[in-house]
Image (cartoon, grey):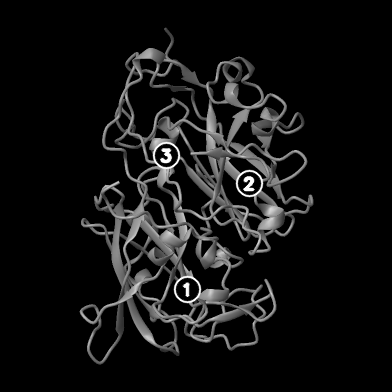
């Protein structure tokens, strides 16, 4: 035995995270044209969930300041557009809250323009809106952002293509297996039928990307409230050791 | 399943550069840390073109094969090297290149008693990827450990080379790891 050998019991068990089927979009989704050269052509190799996969970066308070969750402040004045509150809980699929985890968002402004050099949509930038926010969930897994409702914007995927209004969300959870980047959409958007990104999600799971308007979250004479819970892969309830393979 | 339904993934889109990169993102350890290595490479698409709007994220054990995480059955390890956080993220440049400054990870025990060779887990995000893809970086100078690694052993030998970072003979501490998203020389991606 040397000091360089990893020290652990001869056999030990690790949490096992569910492997979802029928939830995430297939990487090869031809209606979204950019997948053609970027989605892998080979099927993925099954990776056992070992120590690197069941751990992950625990990114919290050090990455955010108190004002990062309010995208309407920090500039010379107030941004244009419809002020909204977006809040909800980060859970795992066992229903347990995920506390103290970093949530990052980015979005277009009210005109449908991103504060990014690549965005050529001829809609105005807003000097009072950069469209980037972050926060850390509280002990009950709750996050809360104050922002502006983003506008729809055109893109060149197909003739007269428009993205429904959305906010990009990035989540870490507590394990490498739980990492998720997604988009939150708004109720009643008329653009869903022609959006290949939204429609890439299996139909049964698509509605989970749409937040709900909630009058109880709405602050009188100030901002509309929208609720949206985010559910990350949970640990399987029971782990059986396969003794035959030991 | 009795709990709430999982939230589906969506692409990071073309504007991830607004929201995800951090100034210190590429530095798993602070620059200048003794023993630090740099892993660099180019992300290419199925036509061989560099991908200028991707994000590479890394997660790994420390040099002793430990994690600062409570789910490690050996207990959460305090970092022995100041500023080591195990996690790195780097957006690709106009030429498709990224770099990560880190320490070499240690080998890891497996639940069944085997040992995993030193490796770094990688998530790749970009426009055109509706979910992240996951790969692993192994080290070319760990031939013995790699040969015994339970994950590498399951990979088609003709493709396993895509998982090996190669030391630059001219620059000590520099490793090359390119990622090919599709087509000839396609990197092995994992279902995690």
Q: Dot 2: few (<14), some (14–19), or many (≥20) neighbours within 10 Å? A: many
Residue B188 in picture, x, y percent from top left: 64, 36
Q: Dot 3: few (<14), some (14–19), or many (≥20) neighbours within 10 Å? A: few
| Up-down relation of residue A169 to residue A224 (above or below) | above
Quarter holding the C terminus of chain A? top left
Task: Tell if the residue under mark 3 belongs to the same chain as the one under mark 2.
Answer: yes
Task: State the image quarter where residue A57 is shown.
Answer: top left
Task: State the image quarter where residue A226 is shown.
Answer: bottom left
**Which residue position holds label 1?**
A166
Q: Dot 1: few (<14), some (14–19), or many (≥20) neighbours within 10 Å? A: many
Label 3 marks a residue whose chain is B
Residue B9 in picture, x, y percent from top left: 48, 57
Cα distance, mark 1 to mark 2?
31 Å
**Which residue position holds label 2?**
B99
Cα distance, mark 1 to mark 3?
39 Å
Q: Relative to residue B100, is residue A59 drawn left or right? A: left
Q: Does dot 2 land on a helix, a strand or a loop?
A: strand
Q: Relative to residue A236, is residue A52 drawn left or right? A: right
Q: Sequence order check: which comes first, mark 3 or mark 2?
A: 3
Quarter holding the N terminus of chain A? top left
Label 1 marks a residue whose chain is A
| Residue at the image point whose x is 53% and y is 75% from the top | A193
**Can residue B54 be seen here?**
yes
Q: Residue B82 got which mark?
A: 3
Task: Out of A105 and A40, give the one closest to the viewer.
Answer: A40
Instruction: Look at the numbered discs 1 and 3 and tell me whether their residues touch, using CB distance below 8 Å.
Output: no
**Can residue B51 be seen here?**
no
């Amino acid at each position: 035995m040397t000091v360089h050998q990893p020290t652990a019991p001869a056999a030990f068990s690790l949490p096992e995270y569910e492997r979802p089927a029928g939830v995430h979009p297939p990487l090869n989704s031809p209606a979204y044209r950019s997948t053609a050269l970027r989605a892998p052509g080979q099927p993925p190799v099954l990776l056992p969930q070992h120590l690197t996969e069941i751990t992950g970066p625990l990114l919290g308070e050090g990455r955010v300041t108190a004002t990062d969750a309010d995208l309407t402040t920090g500039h010379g004045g107030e941004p244009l557009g419809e002020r909204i509150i977006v809040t909800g809980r980060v859970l795992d699929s066992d229903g347990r809250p995920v506390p103290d985890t970093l949530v990052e968002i980015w979005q277009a402004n009210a005109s449908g323009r991103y504060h990014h050099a690549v965005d050529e949509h001829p809609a105005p930038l807003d000097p009072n809106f950069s469209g980037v926010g972050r926060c850390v969930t509280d002990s009950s897994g709750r996050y809360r952002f104050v922002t502006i409702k983003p506008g729809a914007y055109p893109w060149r995927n197909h003739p007269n293509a428009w993205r429904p209004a959305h906010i990009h969300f990035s989540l870490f959870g507590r394990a490498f297996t739980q990492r998720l980047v997604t988009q939150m959409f708004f109720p009643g958007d008329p653009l869903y039928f022609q959006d290949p990104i939204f429609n890439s999600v299996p139909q049964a799971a698509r509605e989970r990307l749409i937040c709900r308007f909630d009058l109880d979250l709405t602050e009188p004479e100030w901002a509309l409230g929208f609720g949206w819970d985010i559910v990350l892969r949970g640990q399987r309830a029971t782990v059986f050791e396969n003794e035959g393979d030991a | 399943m009795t709990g709430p339904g999982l939230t589906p993934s969506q692409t990071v889109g073309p504007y991830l550069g607004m929201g995800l990169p951090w100034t210190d993102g590429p530095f798993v350890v602070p620059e200048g840390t003794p023993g630090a290595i740099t892993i660099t490479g180019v992300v290419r698409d199925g036509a061989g073109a560099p991908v200028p709007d991707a994000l590479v994220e890394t997660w790994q054990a420390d040099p002793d094969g430990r994690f600062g995480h409570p789910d490690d059955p050996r207990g959460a390890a305090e970092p022995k090297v100041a500023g080591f956080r195990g996690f790195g993220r780097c957006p690709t440049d106009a030429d498709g290149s990224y770099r990560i400054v880190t320490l070499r990870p240690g080998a890891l025990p497996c639940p069944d008693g085997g040992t995993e060779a030193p490796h770094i887990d990688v998530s790749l995000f970009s426009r055109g990827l509706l979910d992240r893809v996951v790969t692993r970086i192994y080290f070319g100078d760990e031939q013995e450990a790699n040969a015994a690694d339970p994950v590498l052993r399951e990979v088609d030998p003709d493709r396993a080379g895509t998982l090996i970072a190669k030391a630059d003979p001219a620059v000590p501490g520099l490793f090359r790891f390119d990622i090919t998203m599709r087509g000839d020389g396609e990197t092995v991606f994992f279902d995690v």
